[in-house]
Structure formats: C-alpha cells, structure tokens
Image (spheres, helix red, strand yellow):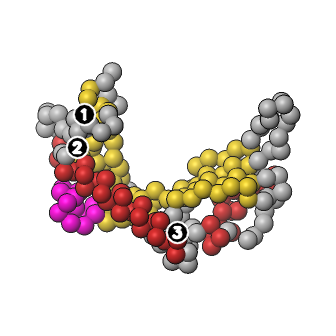
Amino acid sequence: AIYHDVARLSASPTHAYHFLHDNRELLGIPGYQDFEVVDLYKTNKVNAAARRLPTEVVVAYVWREPVLLEGSRFGELEGETAPLLCGGTLVLDGRGNIQSWFRKPGTGYEEDEKALAEGHARRDALFEHLARQVARGRIGLAHKIEGLGVQGPPIVARNVAGFLSLESSPHFRARQGEERWHLSF
C-alpha cells in the first residue's frame, strides 16, 4: 500500500484520485481502466450519548467496464457494448487506516480469484437482466424509435461514447414481480 496524508486526500477529488491510482493493485482496479472519484466527504457523527466520534473520510470511485452483447437473446442490442459499473467505497480513519471497503469488481483483475468470480457473476447478471428486458419488449434503440411519432418501449437505449446508456421515462415504473409497466404521475 502507498500511504497518503488523509487530510490532503480528503481535501479534493484530485488528491483522492492519486491515492486510488497509487493503490490500484491493492484495490483491484485494473491498470488499463480509467476511473473517477464520484463522492468524497468527511463524516461528522455523534454516538448515542451525543459525544463526537472520530472523523472518517469516505471515498467512492467507479469505472465502466465494457461488455459486448453477443447473441440473439439481445435482439437489436446485439453487437452493442454495455457498461458494467465497477468500483468501490472506502472508509478511512483519521490516520489513513481502512475501516471498511465495499467493492463491485469487474472481470479484468485476475490476481484475485474471488473478486474475478464475483465480477463474472455481476457481468452474467447484467446479461440476464438485459436479455429479459429485451424479451419483454421493454428496451428499444433510440435511433429506431425517435421521430416515428409512436410510443416506444419504456426503456430507450442510446449509444453514448461507445456505451449503451439506458434511459427510462420518469412516469413509467414497474412494480416488483409484475410484468406490466404502469403509468404513474
């Protein structure tokens, strides 16, 4: 591990990025993946007796691992690239010790077999979810829907910078366990 001054690390996302970059191997961030710091803050907690607890620094980071959608089960999305969101959240104490670490690994870090297996399971779950939505007619490509004057599926897929971006209308929602989409205002 490469240590950084926690006060400096918590001062800006740039310093947090350098800390994460210097510790890629420890954190399982593949060297070829760019990532971003998506949240950085210091805690300000009190216990049940209203006594101030030590300050902690929380750093959340994410990267998008490209996964190719291959096979007819993806319908018109076949051949597109979907993002598997990967990353983690670190909680550090005032001296830089890791208090907790939650991560969502991808499939590109072979040095940790458990994380690699979890990354493959996450990727397979994404494939199953997308294939299920395609089979139910819930996803359509934006360039095939827009301008036709017809109501398309509740989820629209756009290719943004080489990745599919899935957008749903805010007035559509699915209820747990139901196959139909409902209009809600």
- Which residue is outermost to the bottom? 111
Q: Secondary structure at mark 1?
A: strand
Q: Position of residue 26 (x, y in %)?
A: 65, 70
Q: Earlier in the sequence, mark 3 or mark 1?
A: 3
Inspect the image, locate mark 2, and give the three-letter code of the amino acid beneath it.
Answer: Arg
| Cβ atoms under marks 2 and 1 closer than 8 Å | yes
Quadrant containing the C terminus in the rendered view = top left
Q: Which residues are magenta?
A: 69-80
Task: Answer whether residue 133 is magenta in the image.
Answer: no
Rounded to the nearest whole Å, what is the CA distance between mark 2 and mark 1? 9 Å
Q: Is residue 8 visible?
A: no
Q: Which residue is mark 1?
A: 181
Q: Which residue is mark 2?
A: 138
| Cβ atoms under marks 3 and 1 closer than 8 Å | no
Query: What residue is shown at x 82% (from left), y 40% (from top)?
Result: 53
Mark 3: few/some/many CA within 10 Å (<14, 14-19, 20+): some
Query: What residue is shown at x 35% (from left), y 49% (from top)?
Result: 165
Q: Position of residue 50 (x, y in %)?
A: 83, 30
Inspect the image, locate mark 1, and give the three-letter code of the amino acid beneath it.
Answer: Trp
Given residues 146 and 174, the one toward you in this image is 174
Q: Is residue 17 visible?
A: yes
Inspect the image, locate mark 3, and give the three-letter code of the amino acid beneath it.
Answer: Ala
Task: Answer whether residue 73 is magenta in the image.
Answer: yes
Q: Secondary structure at mark 3?
A: helix
Q: Position of residue 105 (x, y in %)?
A: 51, 63
User: Could you say which disc has been placed on residue 115 in the image?
Assistant: 3
Given residues 105 and 14, the one toward you in this image is 105
